[in-house]
Image (cartoon, helix red, strand yellow):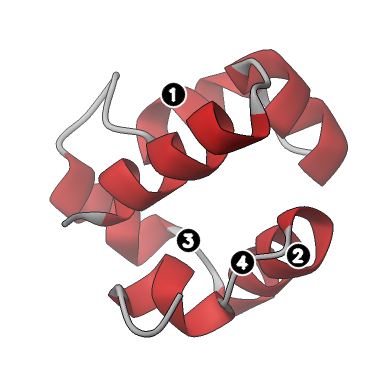
């Protein structure tokens, strides 16, 4: 499972739009589309997600930072 897959799972499970996901994190919608694999290959996206953004996603949405970054324990 790729980073893009995990971010898409978060968005789906939270029942929010990508625009809402971006708004809650303080990032652009375009960046969300890049990260979720809709604009560029997702393997590049994994290099674009900082640990601080992964931590913010974990705090905001209640997921493990390790799972977001590496697919570890959820």
Front residue of 10/37: it is: 10
Corner quadrant of residue 35: top left
| Circle nearer the N terminus (3, 4) | 3
Instruction: Nearest to the eye among marks 2 and 3: give it.
Output: 2
Q: Residues within 10 Å of mark 1 (few under 14, many from 20)?
A: some
In space, the residues marked 2 and 1 are separated at their CA atoms by 18 Å
Q: Are marks 3 and 4 in contact (CB under 8 Å)?
A: no
Q: Are marks 2 and 3 in contact (CB under 8 Å)?
A: no
Residue at x-position 42% and y-position 74%: 67
Q: Which mark is residue 56?
A: 2
In space, the residues marked 4 and 1 are separated at their CA atoms by 20 Å
Q: Residues within 10 Å of mark 3 (few under 14, many from 20)?
A: some
Q: Which mark is residue 49?
A: 3
Residue 52 sits above or below residue 1 on the image:
below
Residue 37 sits above or below residue 20 on the image:
below
Residue 48 sits above or below residue 27 on the image:
below
Residue at x-position 27% and y-position 31%: 37
| Residue 72 pos. (x, y %) | 33, 83
Q: Residues within 10 Å of mark 2 (few under 14, many from 20)?
A: some
In space, the residues marked 3 and 1 are separated at their CA atoms by 12 Å
Compared across the picture, whether 9 is left or right of 43 comes to right
| Residue 64 pos. (x, y %) | 57, 77
Q: Which residue is mark 4?
A: 63
């Amino acid at each position: 499972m790729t980073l893009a897959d995990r971010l898409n799972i978060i968005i789906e499970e939270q029942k929010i739009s990508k625009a809402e996901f971006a708004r809650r994190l303080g990032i652009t919608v375009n960046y969300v589309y890049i990260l979720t694999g809709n604009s560029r290959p997702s393997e590049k996206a994994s290099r674009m997600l900082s640990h601080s953004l992964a931590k913010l996603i974990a705090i905001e949405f209640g997921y493990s930072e390790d799972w977001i970054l590496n697919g570890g324990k959820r």
